[in-house]
Amino acid sequence: MKFPTPGGSAPASGITSERELPDWLTEFMENTKWGEAPDYFYFWTGVATIAAVLQRKVWLPMGTFNWYPNLYTLFVAPPGVIQKSSTTDLGMRLAKKIPTVHQGPTTLTWQSLYDAFLAVGTEFQVSETETQTQYPLYINSPEFGITLNMKDVDMINQLIHMWDGYELKKRTRMDGELLIPTPSLNLIACTTPSWIAENVPQYLIGGGLTSRMIFVYGDIKKHYIAYPQDYMPEDYAERQDRLQRDLERISQLVGPFRITTEAKLWGSEWYRRFHETEAKQLDPTIIGGYIARKQTLVHKIAMVLAVSLGNELVITRDLLERAVGLLTSLEKNMPLVFSKIGMSTDAQNSEQILAFLDKYNGTVDFNILYRYMHRKYSSPEVFEQVLMGMIEAKYITIDKAKRLVIKL
């Protein structure tokens, strides 16, 4: 067996000074509100940034296992609508400046990931008598399709194991068993619904890797900013410096989280209510696996919210309630993320027809519509059959006398 040797030692666990900001996430959003993306894009960028710098040095004990604050966050938007990677970079640039925070490969193969982990192994001191070793990386991917090949089942399984807190393990003929015992991987990536439809198999939806991901979906700009520099606050650089310093303080936190008795009581009641009532309102064919992992995600997010406020590693009822609300707010858009998976060609073309009708305020001459769709339907008879299906589904109606197609 090849066992990696740590590449260095992390700083001592103490925080050298008090925080400069009362809430890191609030200040991060305040210093990015000039951007075009929806506010929640910046919020979840901030959450992913804190998770990346916490690494594996803090955890929530759960008896026979621990929950760590590592997250896989995927920002999804149609192309050209929201500047996804520009938004996520606002957080990742802060993380990148911290010497103990390491960026992993943007193209995932077994060897590249193993080598990257091997180079960043560090020991950190939990107490006067206990040290631990971690192998922490974050990946900032502007194009998720370049980072992960969804047909690479072995790599997907490795990502699942690492999200769950387990080791990264591989056996090769040449080297035997290769092992990274305590990896910490945070993934921040961007993609489009079309890429998901074309590359994510139907069987992966609702379980496996996708059930462990936070999907942040958007399709509308908050506002239009042609020249961002004109809208940035005058003290932007100073505020960035404060964010940077406090983020480094957050990165030095070490030890187990404690969850208060009140939080446990509320969390137990919510857990029962969610599975008995709320989960039944979610589509299990789309997010069935997410239902089983929502409690874990809630507590991961609660850890991030806690350290955003200060150095105390305590999860209170308020933080747990807020984490539930934040995660729940994303659920309404999850069907939009996966909406095109398994969709037939005619169904996709029907969506294109409806979008074309919107450009004409819902009513268009049949000949104009057919000219637009002619490259996909060379036969008028086949095109008319598609329109008949849309009529039966009550998406459109046709005024035969005027030869108009009308969106309902």
Image: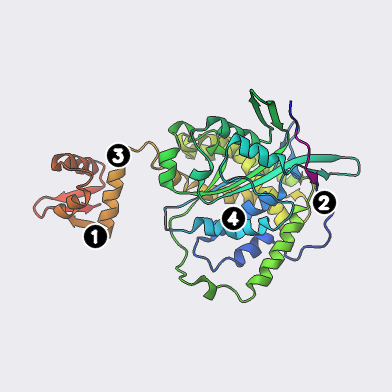
Categorize mark 1 by other alpha carbons within 10 Å: few (<14), some (14-19), many (20+): few
Inspect the image, locate mark 1, and give the three-letter code of the amino acid beneath it.
Answer: Tyr
Residue named by callout 1: 360
Mark 1 and mark 4 residues within 8 Å of each other at the beta carbon: no
Mark 2 vs mark 4, foreground winner is 2
The answer to whether residue 40 is seen in the rendering is no
* Residue 172 picture quarter: top right
Vertical relation: 16 (above or below) 237 = above
Residue named by callout 3: 345
| 3D distance between C-alphas at marks 3 and 2 | 56 Å
Range of magenta residues = 4-8
Mark earlier in primary sequence (3, 2): 2
Mark 1 vs mark 2, foreground winner is 2
Mark 1 vs mark 4, foreground winner is 4
Residue named by callout 4: 45
| 3D distance between C-alphas at marks 3 and 1 | 23 Å
Residue named by callout 2: 11
Q: In the current view of this chain or complex, which residue is farthest to the right?
A: 128
| 3D distance between C-alphas at marks 1 and 2 | 62 Å
Numbered disc 1: secondary structure? loop
Inspect the image, locate mark 4, and give the three-letter code of the amino acid beneath it.
Answer: Thr
